[in-house]
Image (spheres, grey):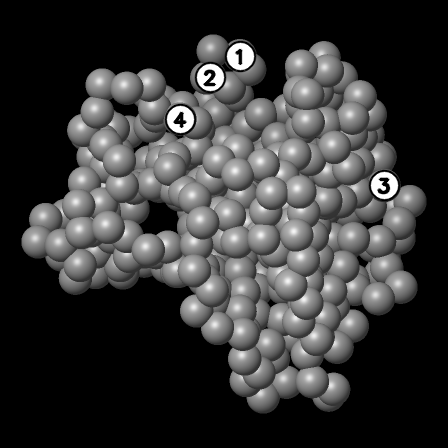
Amino acid sequence: MPSPHVETVKLDELNCWRIRHGQAELLVAQQGAHILSYQLAGQPPLIWLNDEAVFKAGKSIRAGVPVCWPWFGNLARNPQSVQDMRQSNDPAPAHGLVRATDWELLGIETQGQSLVVELVLPMPQGGLPGWPHPVDLKLSIRLDEQLHISLTSHNRGTESVSISQALHSYFAVSDVRQVHVEGLDGLDYIETLDDWKTVPQAGDLHFTGETDRIYLNTPPQLSIVDPAWQRRIQLTSSGSRSAVIWNPWIDRAAQFSDMAADGWQRMLCIETANVMNDVVTLAPGASHTLGVSISSAAL
């Protein structure tokens, strides 16, 4: 296999790397260790790069694969053990503290037929602002015939730490109204748009309006079936028993200054997560890895 090609690029205010390895092209921002896009030669993108995304220092990016950590979504909706980790009276930002922070590139190296990219979050001795816990964080990206993403948390402190987290993946689709998700039949989910009720899933998930659901006790494998693009996007998760499925639809997308009016049609989020009762508690010295492998196959 030819040597990988690594190019340093600047998207407005953000430093990024464009990496080509075999048939794959990957774009990663230093801020947030944020995968912005992933595509195989001759195919539509797998990871969605929002045309209207804003690349400003200190502003989280609505595209790609944001890293949500050490809590997911609204902190007040998290289990009490996760809420108790924060020690600040200031408003808690949505999806945690690491999406708008610069990470350090640990290395880009070939391992056999694979290319491995590793980034680490420099953790101050006193932890993050309002979150004083010495937990090291590493994001690993491996390119082979698939895209493998893993987020490892290592508690180097002397007290247990509870976190919720997600790899908030935006998948590119032909038209969200025409795709469906397999692997959810029979699962319970929390319907956040209807007073957070718990509801059973019947059959595959099709999309007819705004969707924001937390699926519980999810299996390792889920699939997005996209007939117009004649492909199935396959997700294989590890270290996770929950998944969040989200699409803003028309009215909600219209409220976003960083999404085109029809941008909602071209994306679907399936977030590999540890949320609700799937909280992660790290004993002193313990580590946890949340991971997802992404591939596509013809229908």
Q: Amino acid at mark 4?
A: Pro
Residue 221 drawn above or below residue 174: below
Residue 12 image offset from top left, x and y in percent: 66, 42
* Marks 4 and 1, the one that precedes in the sequence: 4
Residue at mark 3: 174
**Distance from label 3 to label 2 (Cα)?**
30 Å
* Marks 3 and 1, the one that precedes in the sequence: 3
Whether tag 3 and tag 4 are in contact, CB under 8 A, the answer is no
Residue 149 image offset from top left, x and y in percent: 53, 60
| Residue 220 shows in this picture | no
Q: Is residue 2 left or right of residue 101?
A: right
Residue at mark 4: 93
Q: Nearer the viewer, mark 4 or mark 2?
A: 4
Q: Amino acid at mark 3?
A: Ser
Q: Amino acid at mark 2?
A: Lys
Residue at mark 1: 194
Q: Nearer the viewer, mark 3 or mark 4?
A: 4
Residue nearest the observer in this picture, 57 or 195: 57
Circle 4 Cα neighbour tier, 10 Å, few/some/many (<14 / 14–19 / ≥20): few
The residue that appears at 52% across and 21% down in the rendered structure is 191
Whether tag 3 and tag 2 are in contact, CB under 8 A, the answer is no
* Marks 4 and 2, the one that precedes in the sequence: 4
Q: Nearer the viewer, mark 3 or mark 1?
A: 3
